[in-house]
Image (spheres, coloured by chain):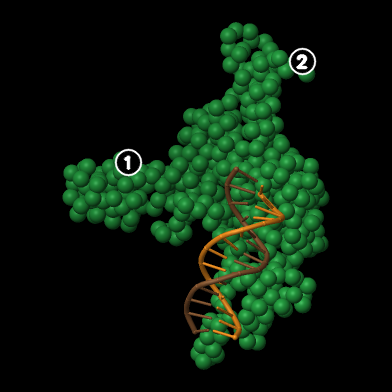
Chain colours: A green, B orange, C brown
Amino acid sequence: MLQIQDQSLRPLTTAHLAQTMSMLVLSNQELRDRVIAELASNPALEIQDERVCPGCKRVLRGTIRCPVCTQKSKYDEPLVFLSPRDSMRRYPRRSFEEAPTDQEPAAPEDLTTYVLRQLAAELQHEDRPLAIYILSSLDDDGFLSDPAPFIAQATRKSIFEVQRVISLISNVDPVGLGTNGPKDALLVQLDQLENDSPQRELARLLIEDFFTQLAQKEYESISASLDVSQEDIRSAIVYIQENLNPYPARSNWGSGRNPQPGDPNVYHSPDILITTKEDDKNHLVVEIFSAIAGNLRVNPMFRKALGKSDDEKTEEWSRHLDRANLFVKCLQQRNNTMRKLMELLVSQQHDFILEGARHLEPMTRAHVAEEIGVHESTISRAVAHKSVALPDGRIIPLAKFFDRSLSIRDRIKEIVRNEAKPLTDDQIASVLGDEGVKIARRTVAKYRAIEGILPARLRGQTKAAQLAGV
DNA sequence: CTATGGCACGGATT
DNA sequence: AATCCGTGCCATAG
């Protein structure tokens, strides 16, 4: 208690709370950015124990089992953490609720091996793991979001080496792979083009200096500031469109746009994955993806070094050390909360996960909070911005687990589907009443609206029309 | 006259 | 403290 006099202690605890809270709301993607930023700015942090799986060449870290080579039956613990990159590979972006349309698409791992095969000649043997690491870090579009210094730190290579390998990668077949965005991808591709068509230099100029205007089709303003005719601008754009591909990992233009800026939730890779055991379909396995692969920890060397040095840097270093400790603690706390939350959800909503919306047992965040022993707002944050992939392949927001009316809405849907002739809201309400659900007529109407079901009168018309049509 | 949707209120939830 | 949700009342369309 007396220690509180120490300047660093009191702000530390409040900061700790605040930071834990602010990290809890983040989705995995967002958290990953946070961690990367922290790693880049704080030398006291490091990632521990990186390995490449001898079987499938995936990058593994810490105690995590290889998700591919290890049979699912070996998951004997209910909860497992694994790398987010693997989650993206196995669960391509997909909108909420949308069940998997077909078989899992052609494995993107082929891209890795495909690229590696091309690189075989130029790549030194000891650079192979680095190349694999980089390739496995690419996002769906083939871009590398991790900055080179971060990769260097994670792989313990020099930044120079990292940059060299990235440049090798971006110059083989899907040209532009491993760049940090469409703009650089286009530029790399432009460099590789051999034919010196007249539009080429203008195209380069456009991409380099007017990229945002280009994306927003502000051709007039480009034309004005460059003093070039709109005619020429357009022909340069055609040249770009015909010869370059801003998304090197996609086969062609226009297939799948970026998510709209307004709604980050439309397309998602899950933060949590629920699957069933191979041999026991009733046994659920939950995997919570950690924001980064492996263990984030305070660099023990850094800690040691602090004790020895006694120049004026000591103060700055100890600040770093405090910050690193804090950050790691927050991350652990977040993981802990998420784990407890999911344990409870899986045990209480077992039927909902396996059988569908009808079996959702109503529960509130407040109730869960009491069960776990944390504040309600903690649960609110934990539930926010997270999505979970169910065994049947659907990806739903975690908040759905707390939807009070979901199961009733599902029953209404079924009643309407099976009705002989259109039932009015009142009749639906009484049917539900017979099944033991007390619900007002007005509320049925609201649920109907939510589910996009037309009122009885109009349903009659469409049904008649359907019959007439058939 | 009946079925519905809008508005608004109070209680629960976050 | 702010927001969401279920409900009742009432106007309106059919």
Q: Residue at x 63, y 8 (%)?
A: A310
Q: Residue reaching furthest top?
A: A311
Instruction: Output the chain of dot 2.
Output: A
Q: Residue at x 68, y 22 (%)?
A: A10
Residue indicated by mark 1? A208
Q: Which corner quadrant holds the N terminus of chain A?
A: top right
Callout 2 environment at 10 Å: few (<14), some (14 to 19), or many (20+)? few
Residue A240 at x, y = what percent? Answer: 31, 52
Question: Visible in this render: residue A196?
Answer: no
The amino acid beneath tag 2 is Leu
Residue A162 at x, y = what percent? Answer: 51, 34
Residue A260 at x, y = what percent? Answer: 46, 54
Q: Residue at x 60, y 68 (%)?
A: A446
Residue A33 at x, y = what percent? Answer: 55, 39
Residue indicated by mark 2? A2
Along the viewing direction, whichever of A240 and A388 lies nearer the viewer: A388
